[in-house]
Image (tube, grey):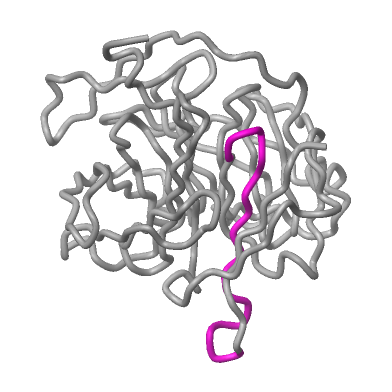
Amino acid sequence: MRGPRAAAILSAASCGTAAILSAASCGAAAVCLLVASLDAPAQRTGNLLDSLDFGTPETRVELPDALNEISGLASVLTEGGGARLFAHDDEKSVIHELDAKTFRILKSFSLQSRYGRGDFEGLTVIGPGPRFALLSSDGRVLLFDDTPANGVANATLVDTRAGKNAELEGILFEPSTGELLLARKQATRKGDDDVLLFRFRLPEGPAGEALRLGANGVRKATQGGKDFRMSDACRDPVSGHYILLSSHAGALLEIDRTGPIAATRRLPKDRHRQPEGIAILPGGRLAIADEAAGGRDTGGRATITVYRPR
């Protein structure tokens, strides 16, 4: 296979039956997206969470101190069966590329100084390059491209206006519509503990409610007494389902695009003290990143745990 089709990147947000190709005419202040069909290889059927072996991890790796406050993951699956894996910090706009097998840091780059600090709560891939969207809890999104080691990325700020009254934590990209889905962590009013995702169409929105799952139904499905407060989210490229992570509830939730719960999974507390990020790796594996529990002063280290299919 030759030409642009062969060079297309299949991301965890966009591989499968569609890939996102950015139009060459896009300006720095705009996001132009073209959805193109690609042939998908034969893969599993059914739900991602039901296919995984959560009993024994494939691997569990301690991360360097620079990732003690890891707050999200994003993966890019390439046509050759490889992957690129990216992580971000909670308070600083620093992006780290990790080796997708050893999880050591391959490179780090930052965003320009005026966006240097914030409350960053999610990272997703929205196009080739790769091109990223980094979410802050107040609903602002920074769009930027992959950048060489120690470089400074030129980011474009987009205000989704979805987080003015609610703390957002978790972002994913839906390639079929060109929309970002933004996950709410905190309720906007007392007594509203529903799991809520907002949709935002690039480049200018507006934002609106996309999916709402009743809190009681989610608590029953996850077999937990705690509210499902979002920590991170990603899209399964095989089924198109959304995988949602809650550190507070210690659970994963898999839903389809219209909202019904497809699968759930409780996470073992001894292995996941503070899970903050999830990403899908080649072979249908799931990576879960845990922040250093209690902070670096306690000697705790951040970790990545990988689960493989049964």
Tell me if 28 is positioned left or right of 216 in this view.
left
Indicate yes or no whether the magenta region holds residue 297: yes
Q: Locate the C terminus by quadrant.
A: top right
x and y, in percent, of residue 7 in the image:
32, 21
Q: Report the residue at 27% width, 44% height from top.
A: 146
Name which residue lies at 74% across and 58% down. Answer: 249
The range drawn in magenta is 281-298
Q: Is residue 48 left or right of residue 128?
A: right
Name above or below for residue 155 compared with residue 200.
below
Q: Residue at x 42, y 48 (%)?
A: 123
Q: Residue furthest bottom?
A: 297
Q: Quadrant of residue 22?
A: top left
> Quick one: 302 or 260, which is closer to the camera?
302
Q: Quadrant of residue 36?
A: top left
Residue drawn where x is 52% and y is 13% of the image: 17
Q: How far from the left and from the top, in percent, is residue 103?
A: 51, 58
Residue 97 vertical position relative to residue 131 in the rendered view, above or below: below
Depth order, front residue of 259/231: 231
- Taking the image as shown, residue 92 lies to the left or right of residue 175, namely left
What percent of the width, then of the height, locates residue 127?
33, 30
